[in-house]
Each structure stands twice: as structure tokens, then as C-alpha cells.
Amino acid sequence: MQAEGPDLYRADHHPQVGADILALPTSQLQRLALIRISQLTRGELRGAPLEAMARHPDLSDCRKLYFDESQNEIRTVGGRAPAWRIVYRLRDALPGPDARLLLQVVAVGARPASEVYELAGARLDRQRIVRAPVPQTTPAPASAAPGRRSLAEAQRLAVEPLRRTQGRRR
């Protein structure tokens, strides 16, 4: 479906996105990245929202669009995710007569090892999300809360005296 008239979004890409596209390993990937970005700008495609991921930059206000030359598909096909990503975000319109939302492509790059997400995080000066480890609670002694024992603990306590008596008989 091709939209007539002006693009749905106003393009405002990061200055290094052109270099990202030229760094893609094949001319087919370069063309496909440009086509996908054009489709995003026209509103023909919409990527998936990025979620906050531990040990990665916070890109929860961004979206990702998959692409891969071997599949010419946008989403996972045949159990294998496309190897390339376009990370972009939608921003409020700038003051003036053009009131369209801004579509800003932040980075284009490889999915493996989260390269494209690291690149986007660096360009947006985002901090890595570090989640504190979940504190390990030590189980309370059996005598501390007799009414709140687990089934496994109750079974162990019930069987333990039987084992002691069987050990004495031998």
C-alpha cells in the first residue's frame, strides 16, 4: 500500500546513519535499508517497540525494524531472526507549519552481540540498565514458623525420625 501525498513522518535522522548504511556488507542490504527507512517515513511499516534490557542502554522510547537480504522479510521467518536492525524513534513535531511527528533513525546495524543497540545507546547518550541482584533470602529454621512450612520441608521432617530409628536397628 503506497501513500499518496507527503510522508506521514518528517525525517530527522542521526547524522551518522548514512555511514551505517554504507558500512553494510552488501549493496543489496544497503538498498534494502534505504527502502525500509523510506517505508517507515511514509508510514507503511512500523517496527516493534524496544523494551528495557538488562546490561544494555535504555532504548525503551525507541522501536526496531528487522531486515535481511536473504529473506526480504521484516519479521522472523522460519525460526531465524533477520540479522539486521534499524533503530528509530518518534519525536514531537518541531514548531512551525509542518506539524508532522519526527521519525529519527538512530542507528542501522547488526543484531548479533547487540551491536546496533549499543551504537544507538551511545548516540543517544543512554546509560546501561543495571539491575541489582535479587537478594537471596535464607530459609527460616523449621522451628521459627511451624505453620508456614513448605510441603518438601514437612515431608523431610516427617521422614527424618523414621530414618533415625531404622539406622539404630541395623
Image: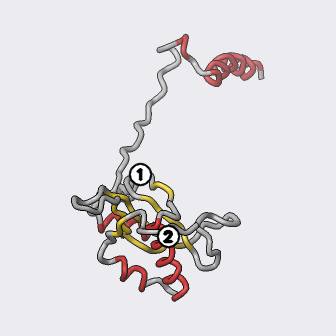
**Mark drawn on residue 52:** 1
Looking at the image, is 118 positioned above or below residue 155? below
Instruction: Please tell me whether mark 2 or mark 1 is closer to you in this view.
Output: 2
In the image, farthest residue toward the front? 5
Point 29% across, 76% down: residue:
15
Q: Report the side of 83 relative to 51 (left or right).
A: right
What residue appears at the point 42 percent right and 39 percent down from the top-left corner? Answer: 134
Secondary structure beneath label 2: helix
Query: Where's the N terminus, which quadrant?
Result: bottom right
Task: Report x, y in % for residue 118.
Answer: 38, 66
Residue lying farthest bottom? Answer: 27
In the displayed structure, 17 sits above or below 149; it is below
Camera-side residue of 148 and 15: 15
Residue drawn at 48 percent across, 26 percent down? 139
Where residue 25 appears, as percent x and y from the top left, is 50, 86
Judged left or right of residue 30, residue 78 is right
